[in-house]
Amino acid sequence: MRLASLGLASLLLLGCASGLKREGQCLADLTPEYVSAQAELDGLEASWRAGLRRRDADLNAPIVRVARESLRSDEPEAAYRKLAEARGRLRPTLVWYDRVYERWRTRMDEEQILSDVRMVLIPTVSGMLFYPLISWNVHSVFWDGADPDAESDPITRYCTDRLAQRNVLTGPRSQPAD
């Protein structure tokens, strides 16, 4: 019975650890794209807002100056079109980054709780018997009956596909020995 409990606990830990590692790698791979997308959107929004400020200044300027500056009146609209196009184009990157980050954060929270439980329970014989049950309950609460490691899970599928594609294009990154 004791051996079975240890085996079950090991399987639960292994599943969580591999999911945490996969999503951590996925997040690390996605972060440069996310940072670049945010920088691009911030720059385009700043350009649009600057155009709005110039247009507003032109509208409040004396009549003589308005004729000369009226050529800039469509500048904010053009800048906004560029911003809207970029938002549409970059939306998948932003959405997936948020989803993967939330998944990774949830796994980290789950692992922290289970780590605290292990420190208290594992040194005792009865703790080794109860740990799989507690682990299962914690997992059930965090994931509300869903299996985050299922191949049908959209985030798992996204990360698995993304990491596989990266490995095909660049070759697997060398991993330090654990």
Image (cartoon, rainbow, N blue to C red):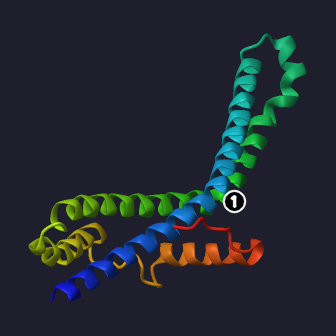
Q: How many marks?
A: 1
In the depicted structure, whether residue 119 falls above or below residue 128: above
Judge by depth and name the residue closer to the eye, 67 or 19.
19
Determine the residue located farthest toward the right in the rendered image. Answer: 68
Judge by depth and name the residue closer to the eye, 45 or 18.
18
- Residue 16 in the image, given as x and y percentages of width and height: 38, 72
- Residue at position x 33%, y 82% from top? 11
In the depicted structure, whether residue 7 falls above or below residue 24: below
- Residue 101 in the image, given as x and y percentages of width and height: 48, 58
Determine the residue located farthest toward the left in the rendered image. Answer: 126
- Residue at position x 13%, y 71% from top? 127
- Residue at position x 43%, y 64% from top? 103
- Indicate left or right for 90 with 20 as reference: right
Q: Which residue is mark 1?
A: 89
Q: Secondary structure at mark 1?
A: helix
Which quadrant of the figure has residue 167?
Answer: bottom right
- Residue 62 in the image, given as x and y percentages of width and height: 79, 10
- Indicate left or right for 62 with 46 as reference: right
- Residue at position x 39%, y 77% from top? 15
- Indicate left or right for 103 with 40 as reference: left
Image quarter (top left, top right, bottom left or bottom right) of the N terminus: bottom left
Q: Mark 1: few, some, or many residues within 10 Å (few <14, many ≥20)?
A: few
- Residue 32 in the image, given as x and y percentages of width and height: 66, 53
Q: Amino acid at mark 1?
A: Arg
